[in-house]
Image (cartoon, rainbow, N blue to C red):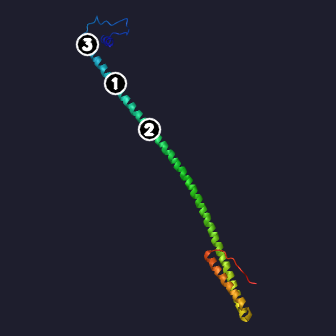
Amino acid sequence: MLRLAYGHMFGKQVIDDESSPPDLEEAAVTPALAAALRTELHERAGSEARLRGELADARAELEARSAAQSRLEAAQGELRAAITELRGLVEEGVTRRAKLETELADARDGLAATVVARDAAATEAEGLRAELERVGAELAGARGEAQRHTGGLAEAQAMLTEAHELSARLREAAAGRQPVQHHGGRA
């Protein structure tokens, strides 16, 4: 340091070589030289303090960035976990929706089958009504025959009983929508 300050003060070029020490003995240390050396020493101390401050600031910034990086990596990990969970929920929702759509299609098919069965039962009930009317007409004709023939009274009563049974079955069938089976018959 002294060599640089000394050489700088007197305009000499100083060569940093151990073989040629400065001529400090030749020059007397003057108050101006001492002041210049003190000034340079203070400047260097100030520069060193400033550099140490900048170094401390850089280290603090590096630590802050490192902490921020760690927080960012932790947040990214949490986001990845949340995304994975959301994907699972979406897949579960898709599966649930497909199941519900299948159940809905099955319910629609069941409803259509019920409508067809209801329509078939209504058609059958109409056929049974027509048969009842025909049997009623036959019964009326049989009553007329029975009145004409005294011996045919037993046959007419049997036909009447059969008609009542058939009528009761038709009513039950119409109420329960069950097909009626005709038992017994006339000869």
Q: Position of residue 47 (x, y in %)?
A: 32, 22
Tell me how far mark 1 sits from mark 3, CA to CA: 26 Å
- Mark 3: give few (<14), some (14-19) or many (20+) Cα within 10 Å: few
Kind of residue sitting beneath label 1:
Arg
| Residue at which label 3 appears | 34
Quadrant in the picture for the N terminus: top left
Kind of residue sitting beneath label 2:
Leu
**Residue toward you, 21 or 72:** 72
Report helix, strand or loop for mark 3: helix
Earlier sequence position, callout 1 versus callout 2: 1
Q: Which mark is residue 72?
A: 2
Q: Quadrant of residue 19?
A: top left
**Residue toward you, 52 or 102:** 102
Is 52 drawn above or below residue 65 in the view shown? above
Q: Position of residue 28 (x, y in %)?
A: 26, 7
Report helix, strand or loop for mark 1: helix
- Mark 1: give few (<14), some (14-19) or many (20+) Cα within 10 Å: few
Q: Which mark is residue 52?
A: 1
Q: Which mark is residue 145?
A: none
Closer to the camera: disc 2 or disc 3? 2
Q: Position of residue 35 (x, y in %)?
A: 25, 15
Report helix, strand or loop for mark 2: helix
Earlier sequence position, callout 1 versus callout 3: 3
Q: Residue at x 55, y 50 (%)?
A: 91
- Mark 2: give few (<14), some (14-19) or many (20+) Cα within 10 Å: few
Q: Does residue 141 show up?
A: no
Q: Residue at x 38, y 31 (%)?
A: 61
Q: Position of residue 153 (x, y in %)?
A: 71, 92
Kind of residue sitting beneath label 3:
Ala
Relative to residue 95, is residue 126 drawn left or right? right
Quadrant in the picture for the C terminus: bottom right
Tell me how far mark 2 sits from mark 3, CA to CA: 55 Å
